[in-house]
Amino acid sequence: MTDGEADAPGLGPHALGMALRRAQASYRRQMDERLAAAGFAGRRFPEGRVLRMCAGPGVTTISDIGRGLGITRQGASKVVAGLREQGFVAVTPSADDGREKILTLTPRAVEYLLAMYRAGGEIEKRVRDEIGDEAMEQLFRVLAVVADGEPALPEDRGGTTPGAQRLRWLQEEDPGPT
């Protein structure tokens, strides 16, 4: 193997990791561009993840956000304060525990999540159109092997909260690209 061949895609001991990081960075950039076009510029981590947690089943508290992100309750409170300032969540005291706060998605958050859903669908459709259904299925098999049995994130399993129900209703009205 020559020095030039070591730089070729698919060769070298770290080619998979580099390709996955490059793809993830490009995916995030494309999502940011599409979300900005939909009126949601300046997306920051972990906004989407937290909003998906709030759209999940049952009630979501600030403590739940902390556990879900692997950060302290104080850190989660700061994240939630930012989302509240942006108009994405409403925060109300828990009837069961006066120290705890319940998070509820606002209509703006539902619009944001729907914009994320559509943007992801557009990217996936572009990739599927480029490589075809069979290659897409193979790609998902490869990613499953890389994931090594890692379960889906809890917030990606859907839910029955009012926010999740609104999101499902909006998706039924306009399922995005097909």
Image (cartoon, rainbow, N blue to C red):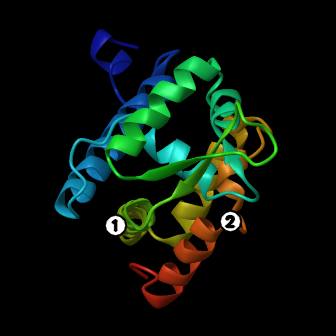
Q: What is the tally of numbered marks visible in this picture?
A: 2
Q: Nearer the viewer, residue 67 or 121?
A: 67
Tell me which amino acid carries mark 1. Arg
The reply, left or right, for residue 131 in relation to residue 158 is: left
Q: Residue at x 21, y 48 (%)?
A: 41
Image: 122 above or below 79: below
Mark 1, residue position? 126
Secondary structure, mark 1, is helix
Q: Position of residue 101 (x, y in %)?
A: 64, 40
The reply, left or right, for residue 93 in relation to residue 84 is: right
Q: Could you say which disc has been placed on residue 151 in the image? A: none
Chain-order first, disc 1 or disc 2: 1
Q: Quadrant of the C terminus?
A: bottom left
Label 1 crowding class (10 Å Cα cut-off): few <14, some 14-19, many 20+? few
Give how far apart the Cα atoms at labels 1 and 2 are.
Answer: 32 Å
Tell me which amino acid carries mark 2. Thr
Image: 170 above or below 108: below
Mark 2, residue position? 161
Image: 13 above or below 64: above
Q: Residue at x 76, y 37 (%)?
A: 150
Q: Position of residue 142 (x, y in %)?
A: 64, 45
The reply, left or right, for residue 178 in relation to residue 69 is: left
Q: Position of residue 7 (x, y in %)?
A: 33, 19
